[in-house]
Amino acid sequence: MSTAGEVTSPRVSIDEALAQHAGEFGRWQLRHFVLVSAAWTLEAMHTMVMIFADREPNMACAAVERRCGDRCDGSGAGWDWVQGSASSTVAEWGLICGERYKVGLVQAIFFVGCMIGAGVFGHLSDSFLGRKGSLVVLCFLNAVFGLVTALSPNYWVYATLRLLTGFSTGSVGLCSFVLATETIGPSRRGVVGMSTMYFFSGGIAALAGVAVMFQSSWRILYVVTSLPSLAYVLIVMPFVAESPRWYLVRGRAHDAMRVLRAIASTNGRCIPENVTLKLDSEGEAAELHAGGKEPSSSSGTILDAIRSPTTRARLVLTVIINFLCSVVYFGLSLNVVNLKTNLYVSVAVNSLAEMPAYFLTALLLRHLGRKPLAIGTMLLSGVSCTAGSLIVGAGMNRVLRMVFGVVGIFGMAATYNLLVVFTAELFPTAVRAAVLGCTTQASQMGAILAPLVVVLGERLPFIVFAVSGIVGGLLVFFLPETMNKPLYDTMAGLEKGERASIRCEDTQT
């Protein structure tokens, strides 16, 4: 309670501080966004390198009279690898015919690692390690595991190291996204957040170019794709700031205000000296001042999201939707490999083809909102896959099936990107990274299932993808819209905001 004559300092949330004083998206946020989102490029390389390292190169009959035995017997039957046995893991360890399953197995093992790591680092990012600290640890581990993978003496050591690489890769995107978007104002957050996937697709395209230059050695390819992660930690991360929202919920108001003042200064703005910060759970939180008393930590875990009736339903829905989206996205991506075209060109073209989906989604996001757009893109993908499942045979029918597959991945790529933005806005800062870790785990489960669906033939995979897309789109109907809504800091703040929103709707009706 203020005494007589005492001037009460204006108390604002971080969203209000950005909108009213520091700027919602200025030079500081642009630089920070680019530096942090570059980590998506690294994630793409560590994930998709398996396409090239584990490819099956061409074989040629080396017999003098060109009469070779069973191809499965390899060199013993007169067959040689055209690019040499060091060109891929398949060639070096003979992963063909009866051993072919090991290629799919190591891919599934990688995504199992991603699933485990997403849960672990999703929690650590919300707790003591923070967004920046988690990203530094993840990128460093990626570099180490990737470099050691290049020394694998046999398949099982290789599989173990891919599991460890997956453990450190699965959370890079979510930590990068949260760190990049938590300093952006509410009116720009959605559109800017949608732009993170450009870095992921760009990383896949760059990987295809790098892989062309190192076709003769899968080991050198792992070295070349791992070193950028080490360079990122040493050169880029020192210039990246921690999220002021994480500082605030951890009770470090002075650090939160320091970052906000740096944002304002770079953007040519100014935060008045008497402005103080507050959590959105104002009823239970004391005033937070840059130089004043700081409250106890307000961070939470995934259990807090489960306990709350409001976030529990959201969590269940987003987990299922992310799982279904991932089945379709990775399934259609892997299905393109079976077109028997140039692998390097196909991967580059497919990654670049996703970019129009990101652009159109970002363009429509501010006008249509998150919910209608997510419904529309998932249903577009589901309907397109339904059409693809009705087409059988070769010739032009195969071309039509490919077209419907391209439209399907176009819609699901847009959804995949949008869901990251949508999910982040559905939950408060205290549990945001933990929830994103949980939904990322669901996505990795979908990625594990996707290659198993692809081997079911030509028609059945399209049916599975169609059902997944349509069901996912229908489930989005049960989520609330988040466009132009505040990004809440605490569970209490979210609950209070939801109650106020319900009262407002009741009054209007």
Image (cartoon, grey):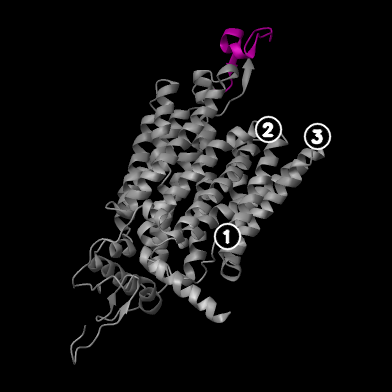
In this orientation, which residue lies closer to the viewer: 107 or 231?
107
Q: Which residues are magenta?
A: 62-83
Q: Name the spot of residue 472 as percent of width and height, x first.
A: 61, 51
Q: Please, is residue 429 above or below residue 155 in the view?
A: below
Q: Which mark sits nearer the N-terminus, 1 or 2? A: 2
Q: Name the spot of residue 373 as percent of width and height, x first.
A: 61, 62
Residue drawn at the location 22% of the way across and 66% of the way down = 295
Which corner quadrant holds the N terminus?
Answer: bottom left
Residue drawn at the location 33% of the way across and 54% of the way down = 126
Circle 3 Cα neighbour tier, 10 Å, few/some/many (<14 / 14–19 / ≥20): few
Q: Quadrant of residue 269?
A: bottom left
Q: Please, is residue 32 above or below residue 20 in the view?
A: above
Question: Three-letter amino acid code at disc 3?
Answer: Gly
60 is within the stretch colored magenta? no
Q: Check disc 3 and report the residue beneath it.
A: 393
Circle 1 Cα neighbour tier, 10 Å, few/some/many (<14 / 14–19 / ≥20): few
